[in-house]
C-alpha cells in the first residue's frame, strides 16, 4: 500500500477478524466514544470478537483520541518496555501508529506501508512475548528510509523506475533490529537517490515539515525525520553523507544520531560516497538512540545513570567557524544552551580551527560527494541484483537533479573532479581535516564540540533555492554548512532540539565527538538533554 491511505483498515479477514476490524475503526474514528464507557455498540463487538479490557489496555475514562495520542507519543524505550512487560499489546500499538499515519498522510513521510504485514508482524510479536520470548525491540515498529533494502517490502531508492522492486534480503541494519524483535513499519520518503537537503522528491512528492506544513523537512532522510516528528513512528532510520540525518533532525525538532563513519553496517543501503556515508537514526530521545545503537552494533548496554550533572565535563565551541553565518535567533538559543550547560557544572570554552578550516572542509566534502557517486551507485546496483542501471536512473531524474549529475557526477561533466584532485582530496585534504579535529580535542581537553546544527530554521517550500540567513542570500546548500566538517572527518555527531525560534520553528544543537567515542557522545548528549534544552 502506498503512502496515500485508504481510511479503512486493510485486512484480509475471517468473520472474527472483520468484527475486530470494525471495532478498531469505531475506536479510532468515533470522536465521542470513551474508553471505559463504551456502551452497547462496543460491548457487542467486544463479545463477538472475544476481546476484553485487557486486550485493549484501556485506561478508564480516557477518550479514544487521548489514548491514541498517548500511544503515538511513546518513545522506543517506553514502547519496548510496555510491550515486553505485557501492559501494551504490540498489535494495538501498531494500530494506533497506522491510524496516525493515515491522519498525517499529507506530509508524505512514507512511500510504502504494508498495513497487513505490519499488523501480522505485531500479532506474531504478541504471541512470541506470551510464549516467553524477549527482545530489546520486541514489537516496536520502526520507519526505514527507502534507500535501505527490505526483504519482501518495496524499495524504490526514491526513483520511479524502481517503483515495483521488492528485494529478497534486508540491509544489515534492518537485519539487526529485526533480530531484536523490531517491526518494519514502512519505507520513508527521501530525495531521489538521497541527493538533496530539502525533502523534494519528484515521483513521490515533497515531504512537509510536521511543525509547519509550508516548510521543508530537510533531507535527504526527509520522511524519516518527518515521521518521527509527526508521531507516526517512535524512531526511523536514515543516512548521513553531508548532514542528511542531522539537518532534518534540526529542522523537524527531533533527535538525529550520526555514528562514527563505518561503525554501523552500510551493506544493503544505496550509497553516495564510500568515504562519507553512514547509516543512523532519528528518535524522540537520546536514550532511544543509545538503545538502537546498542542493538545495531551489539555493544554492551550503557551503565551510565547520571542525568543533568555535567560537573567536570569540558565542551568546546568554535564561533569563527560555526557562528559566522547564523540567524540571530539561532545564535541566541545557542548561547542560552551554553549558559545552561555552565549552570549544570560543565566547562564550556572557545576554540579556533583556523582561517582555512571551513573552506577546506566544504571543498573536500563536496568533492568526495560528487566524485564517488557514479561508481558507488553502479556497484551497489550490480552487487544487489537491482533491476536497473545507473544510466536508467540518471535519465529518470527530475530535470534540476539530472543537470547537477550531468555536470558533477558524470565523467563527461564540465565540473567532474580530475583523478589528481580526487587523489589529493583522499590523501591530503581529508587527513588534514581529521588532524585539525584530533589536535583540537587533544590540546583543549574537550570531550565534545558544540555548534548549531543548522544556521537557520526550515525554509519555506518553493523558496529553498534562494532565501536569506542573517541578511545574506543563500541556497539550500547552506543548511549543511555546519554539518559538513564532521562528515569530512568521519566524526560521530548528534542533533538535539534546543527550543524554537521566534517563528515557532525548531532549532537543533549538534554535539560532535572524537572518532570512535560514540557511546560517550550518547551519554553526554543524554545529560545535556536532561537539562531541558528542548523547552528553551
Image (cartoon, rainbow, N blue to C red):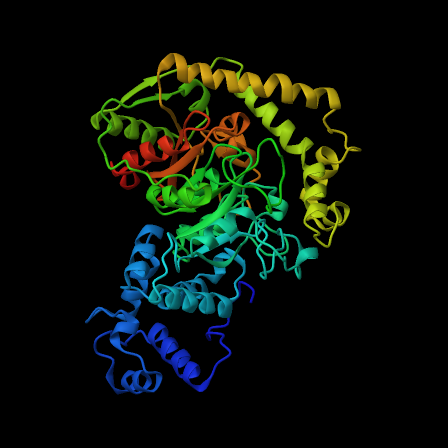
Write down the quadrant of residue 351 in the picture: top left
Vertical comparison of 200 with 131: above or below: above
* Image side of residue 299 versus residue 342, left or right: right
* Image side of residue 346 versus residue 285, left or right: left
The one nearer the camera, 265 or 250, is 265
* Image side of residue 373 versus residue 188, left or right: right
Vertical comparison of 363 with 354: above or below: below
Q: Is residue 215 visible?
A: no
Vertical comparison of 530 with 161: above or below: above
Residue 446 at what x, y percent from top left?
Answer: 35, 19
The one nearer the camera, 152 or 179, is 179
Residue at 51%, 47% (x, y): give it.
Answer: 173
Residue 379 at what x, y percent from top left?
Answer: 71, 41
- Quarter of the image containing the C terminus? top left
Total label count? 0
- Quarter of the image containing the N terminus? bottom right
Residue at 53%, 34% (x, y): give it.
Answer: 262
Residue at 51%, 16% (x, y): give it.
Answer: 435
The one nearer the camera, 334 or 195, is 195
Residue 457 at what x, y percent from top left?
Answer: 43, 39
Write down the quadrant of residue 535 in the picture: top left
Q: Is residue 410 visible?
A: yes
Residue 37 at what x, y percent from top left?
Answer: 21, 78
Residue sitting farthest toward the right = 412
Residue at 59%, 49% (x, y): give it.
Answer: 147
Amino acid at each position: 500500500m502506498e503512502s496515500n491511505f485508504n481510511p479503512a483498515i486493510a485486512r484480509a479477514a475471517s468473520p472474527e477478524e472483520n468484527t475486530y476490524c470494525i471495532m478498531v475503526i469505531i475506536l479510532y474514528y468515533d470522536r465521542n466514544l470513551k474508553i471505559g464507557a463504551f456502551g452497547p455498540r462496543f460491548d457487542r463487538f467486544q463479545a463477538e470478537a472475544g476481546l476484553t479490557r485487557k486486550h485493549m489496555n484501556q485506561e478508564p475514562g480516557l477518550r479514544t483520541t487521548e489514548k491514541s495520542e498517548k500511544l503515538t507519543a511513546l518513545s522506543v524505550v517506553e514502547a519496548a518496555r510496555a510491550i515486553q512487560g505485557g501492559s501494551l499489546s504490540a498489535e494495538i500499538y501498531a494500530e494506533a501508529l497506522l491510524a496516525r499515519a493515515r491522519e498525517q498522510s499529507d506530509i508524505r513521510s512514507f512511500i510504502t506501508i504494508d498495513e497487513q504485514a505490519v499488523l501480522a508482524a505485531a500479532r506474531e510479536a504478541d504471541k512470541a512475548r506470551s510464549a516467553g520470548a524477549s527482545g530489546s525491540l520486541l514489537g516496536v515498529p520502526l520507519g526505514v528510509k527507502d534507500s535501505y533494502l527490505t526483504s519482501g517490502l518495496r524499495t524504490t531508492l526514491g526513483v520511479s523506475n524502481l517503483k515495483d522492486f521488492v528485494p529478497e534480503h534486508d540491509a544489515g541494519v534492518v537485519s539487526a533490529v529485526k533480530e531484536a524483535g523490531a517491526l518494519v513499519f514502512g519505507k520513508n520518503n527521501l530525495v531521489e537517490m538521497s541527493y538533496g537537503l530539502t525533502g523534494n522528491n519528484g515521483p513521490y512528492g515533497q515531504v512537509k515539515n510536521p511543525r509547519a506544513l509550508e516548510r521543508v523537512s530537510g533531507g535527504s532522510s526527509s520522511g524519516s525525520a518527518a515521521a518521527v516528528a509527526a508521531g507516526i513512528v517512535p524512531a526511523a532510520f536514515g543516512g548521513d553523507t553531508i548532514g542528511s540525518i542531522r539537518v532534518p533532525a534540526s529542522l523537524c525538532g527531533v533527535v538525529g544520531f550520526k555514528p562514527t563513519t563505518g561503525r554501523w553496517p552500510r551493506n544493503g543501503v544505496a550509497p553516495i560516497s564510500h568515504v562519507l556515508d553512514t547509516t543512523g537514526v532519528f528518535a524522540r530521545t537520546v536514550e532511544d538512540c543509545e538503545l538502537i545503537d546498542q542493538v545495531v552494533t551489539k555493544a554492551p548496554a550503557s551503565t551510565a545513570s547520571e542525568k543533568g550533572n555535567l560537573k567536570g565535563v569540558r565542551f568546546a565551541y568554535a564561533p569563527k567557524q560555526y557562528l559566522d553565518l547564523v540567524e540571530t535567533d539561532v545564535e541566541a538559543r545557542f548561547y542560552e544552551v551554553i549558559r545552561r550547560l555552565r549552570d549544570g557544572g560543565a566547562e564550556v570554552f572557545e576554540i579556533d580551527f583556523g582561517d582555512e578550516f571551513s573552506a577546506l572542509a566544504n571543498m573536500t566534502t563536496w568533492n568526495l560527494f560528487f566524485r564517488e557517486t557514479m561508481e558507488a551507485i553502479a556497484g551497489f546496483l550490480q552487487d544487489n541484483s537491482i533491476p536497473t542501471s545507473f544510466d536508467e536512473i540518471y535519465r529518470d531524474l527530475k530535470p534540476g537533479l539530472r543537470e547537477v549529475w550531468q555536470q558533477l557526477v558524470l565523467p563527461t561533466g564540465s565540473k567532474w573532479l580530475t583523478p589528481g584532485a580526487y587523489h589529493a582530496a583522499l590523501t591530503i585534504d581529508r587527513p588534514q581535516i581529521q588532524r585539525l579535529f584530533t589536535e583540537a580535542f587533544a590540546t583543549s581537553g574537550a570531550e565534545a564540540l558544540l555548534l548549531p546544527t543548522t544556521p537557520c530554521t526550515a525554509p519555506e517550500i518553493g523558496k529553498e533555492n534562494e532565501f536569506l540567513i542573517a541578511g545574506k542570500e543563500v541556497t539550500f546548500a547552506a543548511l549543511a554548512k555546519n554539518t559538513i566538517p564532521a562528515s569530512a572527518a568521519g566524526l560521530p555527531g548528534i542533533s538535539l532540539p534546543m527550543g524554537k525560534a521566534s517563528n515557532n520553528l525548531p532549532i537543533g544543537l549538534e554535539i560532535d565527538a572524537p572518532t570512535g567515542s560514540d557511546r560517550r557522545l550518547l551519554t553526554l548528549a543524554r545529560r545535556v538533554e536532561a537539562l531541558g534544552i528542548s523547552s528553551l
